[in-house]
Image (cartoon, grey):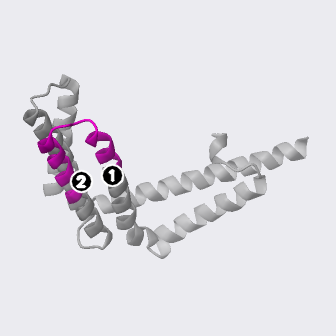
Amino acid sequence: MKKFVFGNPILNIVFGLALIIVAILGMFVFNWFSDTLNIVIGVLIIVYTLLHFAKERTRYKDSNALLILIVEAIVAITVAVLLMFDQLGITFTLGLVLYMRGLAYLLIMQLLKLRSSFLTFVVFIAILTLGAYIWFGGPNLGELFQWILFAIIIIYGAILLYFGIDMLRQKKSN
């Protein structure tokens, strides 16, 4: 836990209070979270897609498998960019990306006649099913993610504030 806090107690208190104030203002007063949530999720999708593609590209030598991975990456990045420019919704984008991830894995396994463990197969069937559910009729994920982002920022601000006050208390007692 010490890696996530500063060594200076005043810095912890200032940043902790600032994060809590920004989270409250951003959620309830200025709607910063609703304005930036699409950008945050779009960037996360792009980063994860690029990392996933870089890892999986070396795994498969078949050109058809690589084509499936390339198409999946292009679609995911395109959809993420459209999400960032408010052309698509979060629910549609996440559903499509999850569906494509599960479908690409299952297509590659079938194409290359590879065998995977039963648990891996079930996980990717679940990803495909979850993607289809979110894509076609899922709940409104935008509001849920706003609350999750709000909670993460508030918790981290409270941790910084707690450690800052605790460090000051320890300095005064010594």
10 relative position to 100: left or right: right
Give amino acid for label 1. Leu
Looking at the image, tell me whether mark 1 or mark 2 is earlier in sequence order: 1
Q: Name the residue beneath numbered marker 1.
A: 50
Q: Which residue: 60% across, 55% down?
A: 157
Badge 2 crowding class, 10 Å Cα cut-off, few under 14, some 14 to 19, many 20 or more, is many
Asked whether 154 or 115 is in front, the reply is: 115
- In percent of width and height, residue 78 lies at 24, 64
State whether residue 129 appears in this view.
no
Q: Is residue 150 left or right of residue 70?
A: right
Between 155 and 69, the one lying in front of the other is 69
Quadrant occupied by the N terminus: top right
Instruction: Report whether 13 appears left or right of 56.
Output: right
User: Overall secondary structure of the magenta stretch?
Assistant: helix
Q: Secondary structure at mark 1?
A: helix
Residue 93 among magenta residues: no
* Residue in the image at 55% along x and 51% along y: 155
Q: Position of residue 17 (x, y in %)?
A: 66, 62
Q: Is residue 14 rendered to the left or right of residue 91?
A: right
Query: Which residue shows up at 49% across the image and 75% down it?
Result: 29
Q: Amino acid at mark 2?
A: Ala
Q: Quadrant of the C terminus?
A: top right
Does the magenta portion include 60?
yes
Q: Secondary structure at mark 2?
A: helix
Callout 1: 10 Å neighbours few (<14), some, many (20+)? some
Extent of the magenta region = 50-75
Which residue is the site of mark 2?
Answer: 73
